[in-house]
Image: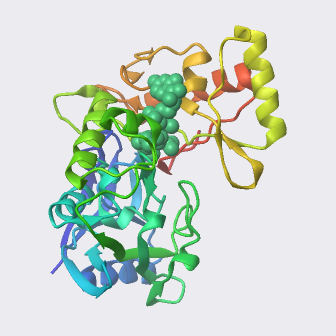
């Protein structure tokens, strides 16, 4: 039987430690409970918020006027093996990093660079979590979900998931509730080729080379810790929702215009970061734009502040409200727009608030 409560404070369930009360709160530990809780709320015309690790959520100080369904389903199993590839299915409520750690320990490659990301497995396809050259679109073979529109359980193949940079069919829509995710992993003690320059440098290899799974995991954890991107109760910089803005992906003309503004402001020696994307578009760095718009690390608006370790993380080191955090976010967004003409877009999911 799912555990049910009323007026539960959501601040205790988000990594930002922000958010007001949920009118109703259901803890679902089996798939049947999860589907039943969502179905019941839908029958009653009650708004639903599906909550996993709360690591990518900004919840209003007013809370949520509906039912929060906390996903606590557990289980990881090998469902198929085929010529060096193993299909592993994990339930939505499994802790993401524990799943990565277990895959590394079992000699399964493909998600080792996604070490140290907070949250649960069920959230991983929603924004196609990615870091250090890997994202889950490279390994996901199936997502099972409860389809609230059709009122049935469906299986989505990778094409139906429509993955792109920090995006998928699941993001920005409440149609699907992810139940489990199946990954195709390589049976190998070696990592997939290292694809991120900073990680390769840390490992002392060139991009394209491989290291052991453990070396890759340890190096990623070390890099993330230095950036305040591994949850640590002793480190207030980690009271965040990770990157607060996505990295802007610009048309060549837009990119040239930003370069022009950079040259005007800083002269020819300062170079705007440039990461070529498909279709001639160019991704640049939101953190760099924030830094160069004049926001130093640790910059605060009231009790909300930019992480002292990474400009892209907005934090609640203690005593802030969601309102405080949004004031800081708007100031950063407006400052970057004024300086460079680029509109930063929030990366975490917003509940009951907007920028
Ligand atoms: N930079 C700055 N100032 C900073 C930090 C970074 O100017 O304070 C510039 C540097 O030029 C640096 C570049 O930004 O070379 C890239 O920085 P970093 O490698 O830390 O990556 P990011 O683009 O800021 C993205 C993801 C992270 C992911 C890292 C590593 C997004 C929105 N963020 O950050 O993901 O861990 O790459 O792969 O794509 C998240 O999504 O929540 C997240 C933490």
Position in image of residue 49 (x %, y %): 40, 63
Residue positioned most to the right: 253
Tell me if residue 72 comes above or below residue 341 in the rendering: below
* 195 displayed left or right of 14: right
* 146 displayed left or right of 336: left
Which quarter of the figure has residue 297?
top left
Tell me if residue 7 comes above or below residue 40 in the rendering: above
Tell me if residue 290 comes above or below residue 214 in the rendering: above
Position in image of residue 203 (x %, y %): 31, 37
**Chosen colour scheme:** rainbow
> Which quadrant of the rendered structure holds the C terminus?
top right
> Which quadrant of the rendered structure holds the N terminus?
bottom left
Tell me if residue 3 comes above or below residue 268 in the rendering: below
Position in image of residue 98 (x %, y %): 19, 58
Position in image of residue 93 (x %, y %): 25, 67
Q: Which is nearer the eye, 203 or 173?
A: 203
Residue drawn at x 17%, y 63% is: 102
Residue drawn at x 33%, y 82% is: 35
């Amino acid at each position: 039987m799912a555990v049910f409560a009323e007026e539960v404070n959501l601040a205790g369930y988000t990594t930002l430690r922000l958010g007001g009360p949920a009118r109703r709160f259901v803890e679902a530990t089996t798939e049947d409970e999860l589907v039943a809780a969502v179905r019941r709320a839908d029958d009653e015309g009650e708004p639903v918020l599906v909550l996993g690790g709360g690591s990518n959520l900004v919840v209003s100080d007013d809370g949520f006027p509906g039912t929060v369904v906390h996903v606590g389903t557990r289980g990881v199993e090998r469902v198929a093996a085929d010529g060096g590839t193993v299909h592993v299915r994990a339930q939505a409520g499994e802790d993401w990093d524990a799943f990565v750690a277990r895959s590394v320990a079992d000699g399964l490659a493909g998600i080792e660079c996604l070490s140290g990301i907070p949250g649960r497995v069920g959230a991983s396809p929603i924004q196609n979590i990615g870091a250090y050259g890997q994202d889950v679109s490279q390994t996901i073979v199936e997502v099972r979900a409860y389809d609230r529109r059709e009122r049935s359980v469906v299986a989505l193949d990778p094409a139906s998931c429509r993955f792109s940079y920090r995006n998928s069919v699941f993001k920005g829509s409440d149609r699907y509730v992810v139940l489990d995710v199946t990954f195709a992993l390589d049976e190998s003690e070696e990592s997939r080729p290292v694809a991120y320059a900073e990680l390769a440098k840390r490992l002392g290899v060139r991009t394209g080379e491989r290291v052991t799974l453990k070396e890759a995991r340890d190096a990623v954890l070390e890099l993330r810790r230095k950036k305040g991107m591994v949850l640590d109760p002793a480190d207030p910089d980690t009271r965040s929702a990770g990157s607060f803005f996505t990295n802007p992906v610009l048309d060549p003309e837009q990119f040239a215009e930003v370069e022009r503004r950079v040259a005007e402001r800083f002269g020819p020696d300062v170079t705007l970061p440039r990461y070529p994307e498909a279709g001639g578009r160019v991704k640049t760095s939101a953190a760099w734009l924030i830094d160069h718009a004049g926001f130093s690390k640790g910059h605060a608006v009231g009790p909300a502040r930019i992480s002292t370790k990474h400009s892209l993380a907005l934090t609640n080191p203690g005593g802030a409200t969601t309102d405080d955090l949004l004031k800081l976010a708007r100031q950063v967004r407006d400052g970057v727009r004024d300086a460079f003409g680029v509109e930063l877009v929030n990366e975490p999911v917003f509940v009951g608030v907007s920028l």
